[in-house]
Image (spheres, rainbow, N blue to C red):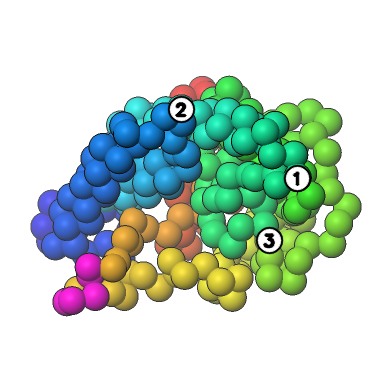
Amino acid sequence: MSEFEKQRRQKLLDEDFYPFVQERFEWEIKEFKKTIQAIEDPYLEPMIDLYYQQLCLDYTAGKPIADLLPTMEKIINYTENTIDHVKRYNLAHPGDRADITILTEYFQTEKLSNLLGLCILFERQDWLETIVKAVDLDYENREKALDSLIAMKIPNYPITEEKTPRSLSFRNPLYKAIHAEKPKDTLKFLDEYLRRWYDGLRKAGNVYIDSHLIQQGDSRECCTFHGYWCFEAAAVAYLKNIDDSTLHRFMYYPKDMVEYARQQSS
């Protein structure tokens, strides 16, 4: 077994694909930075996305968790910048409101839920509040599981009473886990959530799902696989201080992040 295979946190990441996608992310970030230099007021949502993917790749490859902090800081900084941009746009175009697409509760990817989970696991309330400001730009399309996750850290945060869209119904066990009164029930619902999570994202239309299958051959040119992680489930387990050992069997459960968060808070 190679050193890479020992270090990686998810065996789906191929050793020879890792330097390829790492180089690709570095190139895309560099090129985007060059492009925006010529723009007076650039829209920087793509940078949030690129650094999110970079962070997940670093975690998947097994880098020390503390080394992820500068990348997370960049995600937050670009989020703040993009929030300001969107607010200026909405003020100038009241009839054509905008939001930050990847940070809306109805968006059919794991990005928002994972960023909320990471902010919680890193114990950075300021980071969490920045992400929530982005979420709140879209005040119409709300989803009760993510509202409830936010409310675990922001007292009196409103939780929508709207019915969860069918495409996002796989999040219902997460909602139940958050509101469960007994640890055994929280664990039961988190287990159910993790069992439904991957296929739920696929059915919701997340085109990233199954991207690990195209890391080889000509198809790798359009592959951005950086791991599959469910940081929000880990955040709930951490905040509710449950024994999460039975969840470690799920490939998508970031048990190292929970351990890191507990060590930092002890």
Residue in view at x 33 percent, y 69 percent: 212
Identify which amino acid the numbered label 1 is placed on: Gly
Label 2 with label 1: CB-CB less than 8 Å: no
Residue in view at x 19 percent, y 62 percent: 17
Identify which amino acid the numbered label 2 is placed on: Asn
C-alpha span from label 2 to label 1: 28 Å
Q: Position of residue 130 (x, y in %)?
A: 59, 29
Q: Position of residue 114 (x, y in %)?
A: 53, 47
User: How many numbered marks, from 0 up?
Assistant: 3
The answer to if 219 sits in the magenta stretch is yes
Identify which amino acid the numbered label 3 is placed on: Arg
Q: Which residue is mark 3?
A: 171
Which segment did they paint magenta?
Answer: 217-221
Q: Which comes sooner in the sequence, label 2 or label 1?
A: 2
Asked where in the image residue 73 lies, by quadrant, the reply is: top left
Relative to 28, is 39 on the left or the right? Answer: right
Q: Position of residue 27 (x, y in %)?
A: 21, 47
Other residues around mark 2 within 10 Å, as few (<14) / some (14–19) / many (≥20): some
Q: Secondary structure at mark 2?
A: helix
User: Looking at this view, is 4 or 205 the one in front?
Assistant: 205
Q: Which comes sooner in the sequence, label 3 or label 2?
A: 2
Q: Is residue 175 above or below residue 223?
A: above
Residue 47 is at least partly visible in this image: yes
Relative to 260, is 151 on the left or the right? Answer: right
Q: Secondary structure at mark 3?
A: helix
Residue in view at x 70 percent, y 44 percent: 97
Q: Main secondary structure of the magenta part?
A: helix
Asked where in the image residue 44 lies, by quadrant, the reply is: top left
Q: Which residue is mark 2?
A: 77
User: Looking at this view, is 261 or 82 the one in front?
Assistant: 82
